[in-house]
Amino acid sequence: MPSLPHRSFFNSRQTISSRRSSILILAFLFFAFIVFLKPFRDNRCVNTNPRSVRVTWDRSTPTTTAGRNVVADDRHKVMAFVGIQTGFRSVGRRQSLRKTWFPSDPNGLQRLEEATGLAFRFVIGRTSDKLKMSALKREMAEYDDFIHLDIEEEYSKLPYKTLAFFKAAYALFDAEFYVKADDDIYLRPDRLSLLIAKERSHSQTYIGCMKKGPVFTDPKLKWYEPLSNLLGKEYFLHAYGPIYALSADVVQSLVALKNNSFRMFSNEDVTIGAWMLAMNVNHENIHELCSPECTSTSIAVWDIPKCSGLCNPEKRMLELHKMDSCIQSPTMESDE
């Protein structure tokens, strides 16, 4: 690299060649300055990690919108990835979340990830409504906190979306656990982090607030009747839908599934629960994931059993966030 010009540069006697060298140096420094600042335009750090992934059902390997193989490339390593399931009618919910425990900018998400070991993204599918898709693209550009799945966003197709989510999450993140959560619960990321960080002897683990689902009263579950008769039981445990977590080994098995390998039921939580039963995973029943109010130990708060989530999430989310019992750190409490 050429040495900096001597102070004689400002002398009227300096040569034309030294002037040209100085101009080139200044131009180079100016260009480097612009390139350095570019990633921080609009006071937002540009995140190079992919937010949008295309999950194709007739292929076993997901690809991004750019067409590259996302499984073969390096995955972002975290302790757990949390996908907040959301829809096109949930704009207000997402705004309430961004005003409470879910950071509203990529830098905030990065700081939360560094503090807890958890990565968070909203997860949404697609629609044929062009106005809704345009609005979604604007929101994605503003907040950059989505994973956009190439699957139709419909309530009747939630089991398919859930499987697509786990496939996409596994492709993008190298995590010990993958957490599915709804956008109408109040979550404590620090306490969820402590739960995920516990040592476990089972590599295939299913964490949730468990309930017993009846087998014989649901005709869609008749396939389980022979096994139920053999075991002498009429119920099987599965997690409530608003939040549950699957270990990496379990999700890896789901990713390897071919189309129609397992039966899809109308309810997403029953679908996942039945699959977990078939895979013989370890069930970890955590009641703090379905707390009806903020306490010193609650991890996820929602209005069980009145609603599958908070009954008025946009309002209740903001109210809960003002309560000391919701926002105080459990680490601070344990030190007292």
Image (tube, rainbow, N blue to C red):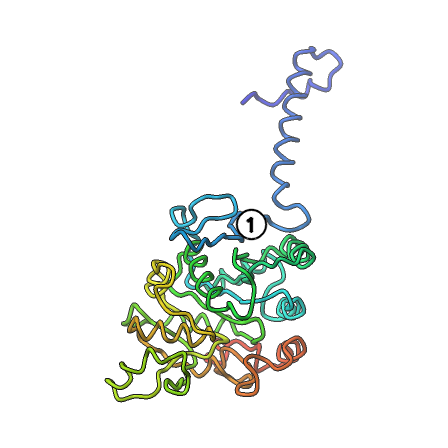
Q: Quadrant of the N terminus?
A: top right
> Where is residue 266 drawn, in percent x and y?
47, 74
The kind of residue tagged 1 is Asn
> Where is residue 318 drawn, in percent x and y?
66, 76
The quadrant in which residue 167 appears is bottom left
Q: Tell me: residue 137, above or below residue 215.
A: above
The quadrant in which residue 218 appears is bottom left
> Where is residue 328 drawn, in percent x and y?
55, 78
Q: Residue furthest left?
A: 230
Between residues 28 and 297, which one lies in front from this camera angle?
297
Between residues 92 and 230, which one lies in front from this camera angle?
230
Between residues 211 and 288, which one lies in front from this camera angle?
211
The quadrant in which residue 270 appears is bottom left
Q: Residue furthest right?
A: 12
Q: In the structure shown, which secondary structural element does the residue marked by tag 1 occupy?
A: loop
In the shown orientation, is residue 157 left or right of residue 88? Answer: left
Q: Which residue is mark 1?
A: 47
Q: Tell me: residue 148, above or below residue 202.
A: above
> Where is residue 52 drawn, in percent x and y?
53, 53
Q: How many marks?
A: 1
Circle 1 residues within 10 Å: few <14, some 14–19, many ≥20: few
